[in-house]
Image (cartoon, rainbow, N blue to C red):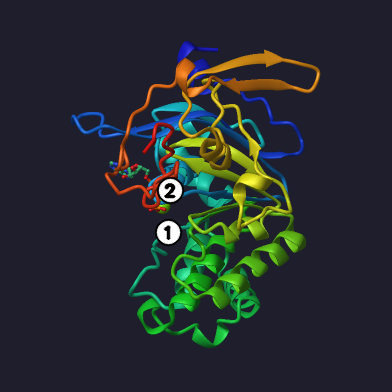
Amino acid sequence: MMYGDMKRKVQIEPLPEDLALQAVDIYHVYGLEHQNKVVALKGVSFDIKKGEILGIIGPSGSGKSTLLLALGGMLKPTAGQIFYTDGTDITKLPEEDQFDFRRHNIGYIFQEQNLIPYLSAEKNIEMPMKLISTPFAKRKQKVKELMETLGIWHRRDHTPKRISGGEQQRVAIARALANNPSLIFADEPTGNVDTETSTQILDLFKELKEETGTSYLLCSHDPIVGEFSDRTLEIRDGILIGEHLEGIDLTDLDSSRFLVLDNQNRITIPEKALEELQGTLLYTWDITKEGFILKPLSRQEGQRERKIKNCTTCGEEIPVGSYSCPRCGAKLTRVVR
Ligand SMILES: Nc1ncnc2c1ncn2[C@@H]1O[C@H](COP(=O)(O)OP(=O)(O)OP(=O)(O)O)[C@@H](O)[C@H]1O
Ligand SMILES: [Mg+2]
């Protein structure tokens, strides 16, 4: 084999059978050429299991859309690997192969639905099938089937502007499902719709998952997505800080969260604990049969006080006693007032 061929055919080893995707140490830095760098992802690793609905929740700006774009091959992450079932690392695919790979394997529901404004709902849904040369009759049949399932068949001739936000969202969902992808990525699938419609959409994902065994990755700033997911990851400031299984407590995420050890061996301490510790910075540690014990040093022994009133990330005023920013969600370990 020529060196060039070898380089193109980088090791292709399928993932373990139960996995639909594996993301390893994803970093993304925006604005490399300019001075204003934003590190949007800081070493994100996780798996999506086959037939699983995985939720990713996190505040605005935490890196959800960046992560989804990278997973779908629409943005090349600065570092990291993203493996699909057959072992393909989508970050290494040449651009022309990425289009093809995406069309066959992935359904993508964008944060802004990205429907083609001058095409009817029906034609929007048909488009991905045209792109992989699905025969005419098959396309028509699939569009009808999807639109009926989603309750939008009566809107088939309308352009996106002439249907409601919820209906547009359904058109975007139907379009994502058109080529029977094994993985669906949805960025804020309930972002533009009322509570009732968002419950309907999330219920629909569940039904479709049961019927087709498709895997879903749903990203949202709204923790309610966690209620509909089999498993939910929490992202803050480009880091996965926690994981919830079924039975997530939406009113108190601290209580149902498993803490995640990130790739720098860091654990994000829950807010409840931070409030209890009142800004302590130094700890002693020990490993016992029961686990890993951290003991805060008393104020006199170890604490360096630093009074801050505003978030160090976005400048928002922080309520007394709070250890996270109400606006951007940044974790603040040094707020003492
Ligand atoms: N094209 C870009 N250029 C520079 N910075 C960007 C770009 N896109 C996003 N960012 C920054 O990267 C970080 C992550 O953004 P991202 O859009 O992934 O967050 P998000 O969790 O999807 O937020 P939202 O809930 O508001 O959609 C933010 O700080 C954002 O300002
Ligand atoms: Mg986003």
Q: Which percent across, then down, holds residue 146?
A: 62, 73
**Total marks in image:** 2
- Identified at 51% across, 42% down, the residue is 235
- Counting from the top left corner in percent of width and height, residue 45 is at 57, 31
In this view, which residue lies farthest toward the bottom?
Answer: 154
- Tell which circle, 1 or 2, labels the residue nearer the N-terminal end: 2
**Mark 2 C-beta closer than 8 Å to ligand 2:** yes
Instruction: State the mark number for residue 111.
Output: 1
Q: Residue at x 39, y 28 (%)?
A: 78
Whether ligand 2 has any atom under 8 Å from the Cβ at mark 1 is answered as: yes
* Outermost residue to the left: 34
Residue 75 in percent (x, y) is at 39, 40
Q: Residue furthest right?
A: 289
SS under mark 2: helix
Snapshot quadrant of residue 36: top left
The residue located at (74%, 31%) in the rendering is 16
Q: Quadrant of the C terminus?
A: top left
Front one among 273 and 6? 273
The residue located at (31%, 39%) in the rendering is 313
Q: In the rendering, which numbered label is found on residue 175?
A: none
In front here: 221 or 94? 221
- Asked if labels 2 and 1 touch by Cβ distance under 8 angstroms, the answer is yes
How many neighbours does mark 1 have within 10 angstroms: few (below 14), some (14-19), or many (20 or more)?
some
Q: Position of residue 312 (x, y in %)?
A: 31, 37
Q: Which residue is mark 2?
A: 65
